[in-house]
């Protein structure tokens, strides 16, 4: 199950893209902007906490420890959202990017996708 922003200390998905030999860490953000998250965080605070956890997961060596075959490969974090980010969420992303340490090569991509209807059992 994908945790999204409700569990900032959980990695939603780790994937390897063989064509580019890149590691992708996915964050699924499919809640409304006025949702309140664990510990009373608003969506911007929860997003900032989740992205901080993801960056630390990579820079602390835990990704390489958990997935030794992915060690040393370029890493991109992809935030997938079903709606445009709010101004507060966008500001949180800007703060995170501005606070990157020298030598931090972890990429960040935001992807807005249309929600898909559930698949019926008859299909």
Image (spheres, grey):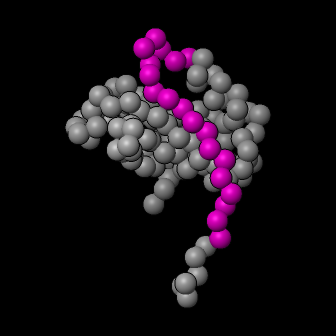
The x and y percentages for residue 9 are 45, 41
In this view, which residue lies farthest toward the right?
Answer: 87
The x and y percentages for residue 85 are 72, 41
Q: Is residue 59 above or below residue 81?
A: above
Instruction: Report if residue 11 lies within the magenta region.
Output: no
Is residue 45 left or right of 68 when viewed as pictured? right
Q: Quadrant of the N terminus?
A: bottom left
Residue appearing at x 43%, y 49% in the figure = 13
In this view, which residue lies farthest toward the bottom?
Answer: 122
Q: Is residue 77 above or below residue 82?
A: above
Q: Is residue 96 above or below residue 4?
A: above
Q: Quadrant of residue 117?
A: bottom right
Q: Which residues are magenta?
A: 99-117
Is residue 78 left or right of 21 when viewed as pictured? right
The x and y percentages for residue 112 are 66, 47
Res. 2 visible in picture: yes
Residue appearing at x 38%, y 30% in the figure = 74
Q: Mostly what secondary structure, the magenta segment?
A: loop
In this view, which residue lies farthest toward the top?
Answer: 102
Is residue 62 left or right of 11 when viewed as pictured? left
Instruction: Report if residue 102 lies within the magenta region.
Output: yes
Which of 108 and 99 lies nearest the eye of the viewer? 108
The x and y percentages for residue 26 are 48, 45
Q: Is residue 27 above or below residue 95?
A: below
Q: Quadrant of the C terminus?
A: bottom right
In this view, which residue lies farthest toward the front?
Answer: 19
Q: Quadrant of residue 92?
A: top right
- Marks counted in the figure total 0
Q: Quadrant of residue 111?
A: top right
Residue appearing at x 28%, y 37% in the figure = 70
Res. 46 visible in picture: no
Residue appearing at x 35%, y 38% in the figure = 21
């Amino acid at each position: 199950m994908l945790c999204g922003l409700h569990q900032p200390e959980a990695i939603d998905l780790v994937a390897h893209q063989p064509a580019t030999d890149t590691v992708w860490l996915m964050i699924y953000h499919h809640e409304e902007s006025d949702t309140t998250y664990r510990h009373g965080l608003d969506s911007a605070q929860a997003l900032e906490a989740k992205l901080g956890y993801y960056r630390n997961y990579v820079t602390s060596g835990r990704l390489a420890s958990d997935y030794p075959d992915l060690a040393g490969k370029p890493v991109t974090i992809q935030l997938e959202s079903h709606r445009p980010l709010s101004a507060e969420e966008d500001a949180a992303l800007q703060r995170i990017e501005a606070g990157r340490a020298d030598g931090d090569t972890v990429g960040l991509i935001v992807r807005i996708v249309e929600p898909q209807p559930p698949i019926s059992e008859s299909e």
